Image: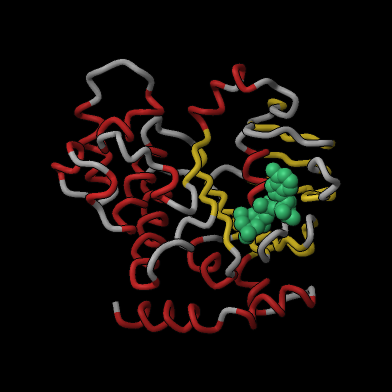
Amino acid sequence: MIEVRDLRRTYRGGVEALRGVSFDVRAGQRFGIVGESGSGKSTLVRLLAGLDQPSAGSISFRGKRIDGVPERRLGFLREELQIVFQDPMGSLDPRMRVRDIICEPLGRAAGHADRVRELLHAVGLPADSGERYPHQFSGGQRQRISIARALAPAPSVLVADEPVSALDVSVRKQILDLLAELVERFELTMVFVSHDLAVVRHVCDTVGVMRRGELVELGDVEQVYQRPDHPYTRELIAAAPKLRAVLARRKGAS
Ligand SMILES: Nc1ncnc2c1ncn2[C@@H]1O[C@H](COP(=O)(O)OP(=O)(O)OP(=O)(O)O)[C@@H](O)[C@H]1O
Ligand SMILES: [Mg+2]
């Protein structure tokens, strides 16, 4: 589905955010990317979505090169690949009604009422949510709105960049479970970015560990979690015991 080869991105000022990253994402895979703040995860996401251009290397989507292609010619990618961002408040226009937000990726044409109803139901929001505005919802509900919007064009790939990091711990698992359920139901391929390996383990089958712009480990998520190869991966596993405990407890309770 996605083929990334020796991808590099150096920002003005000389920051080497990506220093030669290569990996493949197969159809149906739930591919996690984990790494500390500043390791280059969001840079990678922007490149995958065609929102930024690499300094070197290539990205192919379904065998088609997307690097170096101007945004106006990436219409097919907008339909195939959608992103859910970390901060639902920042990514939802406060002046727009939820139904218009959800329909945004579908273009200007009116008459998406059935689709909106379907999507609201799919993400577990009340049927009358479409008439309301983002500020009238909780953080978790706002992330459900973002997810509904991402699903609107029926993409084949969902990219989530820290989708639960801005949320209260108590609703994180609900949103993670929702993503897992939707990925299964709509047979999506998912690229899921987090600084927390415990969260990635909860929703992904494969994980790539990023450190300072490089992929230092790549493999089956359980294997990486149980038997990490790289010392940095071991550090990451040790770094977030609290959330891990919360997720484990809730898993046991439900
Ligand atoms: N537009 C930009 N211009 C210059 N430097 C940038 C830009 N965007 C990111 N960087 C730098 O590139 C590096 C990687 O940033 P990136 O946002 O990809 O990291 P990240 O892994 O997503 O971090 P976080 O977990 O905090 O979201 C950082 O050093 C960051 O400061
Ligand atoms: Mg980021």
Residue under the image location 70 percent in, 59 percent down: 38
Q: Quadrant of residue 205?
A: bottom right
Q: Quadrant of residue 145?
A: top left
Residue under the image location 51 percent in, 68 percent down: 199
Residue 31 or 142: which is nearer the viewer? 142
* Residue 16 place in picture, x, y as percent: 83, 50
Q: Is residue 8 visible?
A: no
* Residue 78 place in picture, x, y as percent: 52, 28
Residue 200 or 236: which is nearer the viewer? 236
Is residue 198 found left or right of 5 in the rendered image? left
* Residue 94 place in picture, x, y as percent: 33, 40
Residue under the image location 25 percent in, 30 percent down: 115
Is residue 112 found left or right of 8 in the rendered image? left
* Residue 26 place in picture, x, y as percent: 62, 45
State the quadrant of the N terminus.
Answer: top right
Q: Is residue 203 above or below residue 182?
A: below
Residue 163 or 166: which is nearer the viewer? 166
Task: Pick out the residue farthest to the left.
Answer: 128
Q: Is residue 128 visible?
A: yes
Image region (quadrant) for ligand 2: bottom right
Is residue 18 found left or right of 166 in the rendered image? right
